[in-house]
Amino acid sequence: MEMDVELTSNAPVDGSEDPQPATGGQLRALFERSVKRGPDAMVGGSALKPREVTFLLDGSVGELREDGSPVFSDEAGNIVDIPVTLQSLTPEKELNALRNQTDPASIPFALAKAQLARVGGEPLDTAMREWFWRAIGSGGRQICVIAAQHVGGAGQTVMGKYQKSLAVL
């Protein structure tokens, strides 16, 4: 079975206007605007900005310290909420996050963990990411998986356009 899929404009999916296929020239222009040129081309190689989602994680979802106090509490014992930012992954980072996943149920968690970019406004290194992923507990990890869907998932409009335009020949 062969599929014929065309790129289309951002025309409404509600039928008020038929989507117009993008031409090869338009696709080339989009590519040219998204690729760095000159001395900075080797640093990152792309002018594409990653998508981000930031949310407030309720500190009560976290694990407990050895002394029984909540891990996300201040010196006075008050639970603090944590600002968390997830960022879309490059194809290479996405594949790396999936590399050792053998259980399909673990895939959303591996991708969400890899998307963790900042906590409390601070970038995460590998050790901090590992600590935070454990410290937020099962409930916090579930919230991160839900948030990750907003970063990398196709929304209802995108899926509607896909379904409307799909042609199986």
Image (cartoon, rainbow, N blue to C red):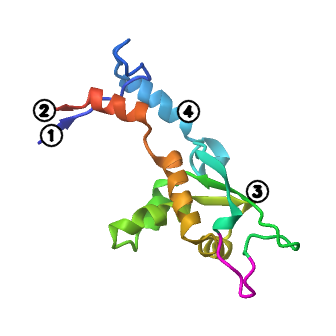
- The disc labelled 4 sits on which kind of residue? Arg
Name which of mark 4 and mark 1 comes first in the sequence: 1
Residue 99: image quadrant is bottom left
Q: Nearer the viewer, mark 2 or mark 4?
A: 2
- The disc labelled 3 sits on which kind of residue? Gly
Q: Quadrant of the C terminus?
A: top left
What residue is drawn where x is 52% and y is 46%?
150
Q: Nearer the viewer, mark 2 or mark 3?
A: 3
Q: Position of residue 78 (x, y in %)?
A: 82, 67
Q: Label 2 vs label 3: CA separation?
A: 49 Å
Are the residues flagged by discs 2 and 3 in contact, CB closer than 8 Å? no
- The disc labelled 1 sits on which kind of residue? Glu
Q: Position of residue 41 (x, y in %)?
A: 60, 48
Q: Which residue is tagged 4?
A: 33
| Mark 4 Cα-neighbour bin, 10 Å: few <14, some 14–19, many ≥20 | few
Stretch of the chain drawn in magenta: 62-69
Q: Position of residue 109 (x, y in %)?
A: 47, 65
Name which of mark 2 and mark 4 comes first in the sequence: 4
Q: Position of residue 96 (x, y in %)?
A: 46, 66
Is-magenta flag for residue 34?
Answer: no
Q: Label 4 vs label 1: CA separation?
A: 31 Å
Name which of mark 4 and mark 3 comes first in the sequence: 4
